[in-house]
Amino acid sequence: MADRYCVFGNPIGHSKSPAIHTRFAQLTGEDIVYEARLAPLDGFAAAVRDFIAEGGRGANVTVPFKEEAFRLCDRLTPRAQLAGAVNTLSFDDKGVLGDNTDGAGLVRDLLDNLQAALTDRRILLLGAGGAARGALGPLLAEQPAQIVIANRTAAKAEALAGHFASLGAVGACGYAALAGRGFDVVINATSASLGGDVPPLPPGVFASGALAYDMMYGKGDTPFLALARAQGVARLSDGLGMLVGQAAEAFFVWRGLRPPTQTVLAALRIS
Ligand code: ATR
């Protein structure tokens, strides 16, 4: 019988994860089935228990349950501990192991798909919520010259920078303080796009040749990518490659195999 996996979220109807993992399974010859499961907002833990009782081997976790998933795990990987959130669960006789593959997925997309250099580069991370926190450990592991976290609420950026200070050069500020400071890679980890909004970036944030990266994705430019384009940025990417990258890393956690990602990403782009 095929091993069973799923993704929990609320809402979950538009999740691309079942299609991605089903394709990974075909490409690697692994015998798995992967479905999307809507968990009630007040019933995430029960939904996980039910899936385990049905024989589930692992699960992905998406909005809004990543912090709750972090709390319910029996064990955590170091990167999940650092991220303070869990997007990948593995079930075995020792209980629930929580991992976080989001940051690794981002870094793989930046390095492998976009050929962006990170080492010795100046990185600007917009936002100081869960998405930013998940990205910081894997980004710092690439040894950039510095990472500046900018946030509407500057105190949250400062707290996050303090949390990661032992891992590399991390600074923090509000948006206005960014004026005239050029960055090579600018990553939008805010949820501003959800409301059709953009972080209030002052001019001069994108250095010559900079890459603008939005963790969000959708048809056409996201509001952040449209702003970057209007400021003359030519290298632009949405977060679809990060989605595929985090899925590939979760697949590796579960199955010990790295599926090819580029064909899967290309197919998603035209679907
Ligand atoms: P996530 O898990 O997606 O990171 P979150 O933890 O709620 O979600 O964090 C949302 C982030 O987007 C925060 O950094 C938030 O800024 P504040 O901390 O100042 O609230 C940022 N954000 C949300 N809407 C924004 C907007 N319209 N402009 C700028 N930043 C915004």
Image: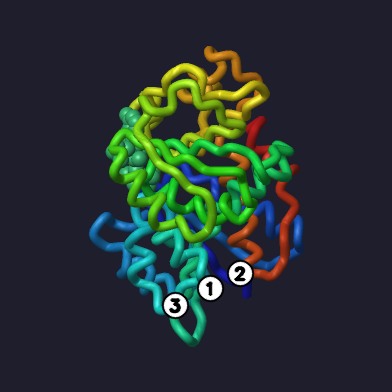
Q: Say which quadrant the C terminus sits in.
A: top right
Res. 246 visible in picture? no
The image position of residue 60, as x and y in percent, is 49, 60
Kindly report which numbered mark, 2 or 3, lies closer to the viewer in this rendering. Answer: 3
The residue labelled by disc 3 is 75
Residue at coordinates 49% horizontally, 87% vertically from top-left?
A: 93
Res. 70 visible in picture? yes
Left or right, residue 38 beside residue 237: left
Residue at coordinates 59% horizontally, 47% vertically from top-left?
A: 106
The numbered disc on residue 254 is: 2
The amino acid sitting under disc 1 is Arg
Q: Nearer the viewer, residue 32 or 137?
A: 137
Instruction: Tell me the CA gap for discs 3 and 1.
Output: 15 Å
Q: Quadrant of residue 3?
A: bottom right
Kindly report which numbered mark, 3 or 1, lies closer to the viewer in this rendering. Answer: 3
Q: Secondary structure at mark 3?
A: strand
The residue labelled by disc 1 is 57
Image height check: is 269 above or below 95?
above
Instruction: Tell me the CA gap for discs 2 and 3.
Output: 15 Å
The image position of residue 176, as x and y in percent, is 36, 25
Disc 1 crowd, CA 10 A, few/some/many (<14, 14-19, 20+): some
Q: Are marks 1 and 2 in contact (CB under 8 Å)?
A: yes
The amino acid sitting under disc 3 is Arg
Q: Secondary structure at mark 2?
A: helix
The amino acid sitting under disc 2 is Trp
Image height check: is 166 above or below 197?
below
Q: Are marks 2 and 3 in contact (CB under 8 Å)?
A: no
